[in-house]
Structures are given as structure tokens and as C-alpha cells.
Image: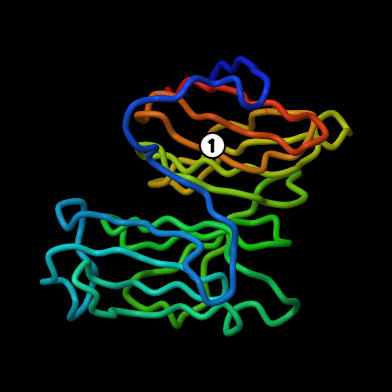
Amino acid sequence: MAAACHVPAGSVPARSGPPTAVPAPVAGGSPSGWDQCPQSHGRLPGPHAPHPALASVGTGGSIMVVTTSGVLCQQLKLDENFQERRTAFLGFQLLPEQGQLWAVCAGYDDVYIWALGDLGRPPQRLRLQDCAEVRCMIRVKKQIWVGGTGLSQGKTKGKIYVIDAERRTVEKELVAHSDTVKTLCSAEDRYVLSGSGREEGKIAIWTVE
């Protein structure tokens, strides 16, 4: 079971080196996220497999899978998959070793998984029990951590869902905060920091198992 301690926002000392994931606000026309995956971790199915490395960049309404030299492999447009209401990508992770692209969207309570071999096909939907809304997502080792808002003992809480990326199943549901979980950050794949909304204004530190 993951353990956590809470500290007031702004009181965490700076760490040397860059974080492994940096959430960014969605902004139309400008990159809202960047996920780089070395070729040694897997290959993109199809004719783009020989490229030395892959990355994906999101602009709110679309995600483009490109080589690190800038060659466009595929593009995923949000409005082609979500027509019932307006939304935007909040976060995404490229898993080339499994041939998958994982993403979460504003106003939705599920995780969506596309096959890299054909981004034009509808995604698989991974449902999160008692989740009201997803706000952020990061990858830690072979896990996907998803933060948002959900029910716990009949009350709305900030929750984190820890997903086994290979099995695509939820391993743990962590009641993280009294307010929604707005951001997640991995520290050396040993700890995960979760930040809550302004009503609580705290950071929790979780041990990765």
C-alpha cells in the first residue's frame, strides 16, 4: 500500500535535476505537453518503425506522434473521437513498447487508450470506479497514475488511481486530498507528488511500490 505524507504547498525543497513529468495548461495552438520515448523502449508499428526515436506533442485539441527529428508519423484529432461535448486533452503518455497512446480529457472520468498502429480507430475506454472527473496523468515505471475527483465513503474527495499499464487494470485507489488532485509529478520513479486545489492547498508525497 502506498504511503503518503502531506506538506503545505510551496514548502517542498527544490530537487536537483528536472522532474520526470511536468503538467502544463492546455492552450489552443501551443504545446500543452511533450512525451519523448527512446526507440530502445519499443517500436511504432508500421512504416515508421525504423526512425531512431519517437515523441508525441499535444496542443489541446490534437496529439501528433513525431520522430525527434521532426518527421510527422501520425496525428490524433480530438473532435473526431469526442463529438458529444467540447473537450481538450489534459495529459497523455506514449507507450511504444505496448504500441499504445494513453490520454485523459477535460470533463471526462475515463482513461482512453489508442493503438499506435491506427490512431483513426476508436480508443479503448478504461473506466475508473467512482471517479467524477480526471484532471491529470503521469507514467511511473510500469504504472499510470491518474489524479482527479471521486467518491470515497459517500463524500467527494481528491483521488489517485494507480493503473497497471500492461494489464490495464486499476491496482489501487488512493484517497489523496479533501480537494481535487490537480497535478502529479514523479521524483526519480521512487516518489509521486500530488497537488490539490486551492481549497486544501497541500502536497502529498507517495512512495512508489
Front residue of this view, candidates 157 and 197: 197
Give the residue at the far right of this rendering.
154
Left or right of residue 146: residue 98: left
Quadrant of residue 150 within the rendered picture = top right
Relative to 148, does residue 121 appear above or below in the rendering? Answer: below
- Visual colour scheme: rainbow
Left or right of residue 198: residue 148: left
Where the N terminus falls, by quadrant?
Answer: top right
Front residue of this view, candidates 28 and 45: 28
Q: Amino acid at mark 1?
A: Val
Residue 173: % across, % down: 63, 32
Residue 64: % across, % down: 39, 74
Relative to 18, does residue 60 appear above or below in the rendering? Answer: below
Image point (46%, 59%), residue name:
33
Where the C terminus falls, by quadrant?
Answer: top left
Q: Which residue is mark 1?
A: 162
Secondary element type, mark 1: strand
Image point (52%, 49%), residue name:
23
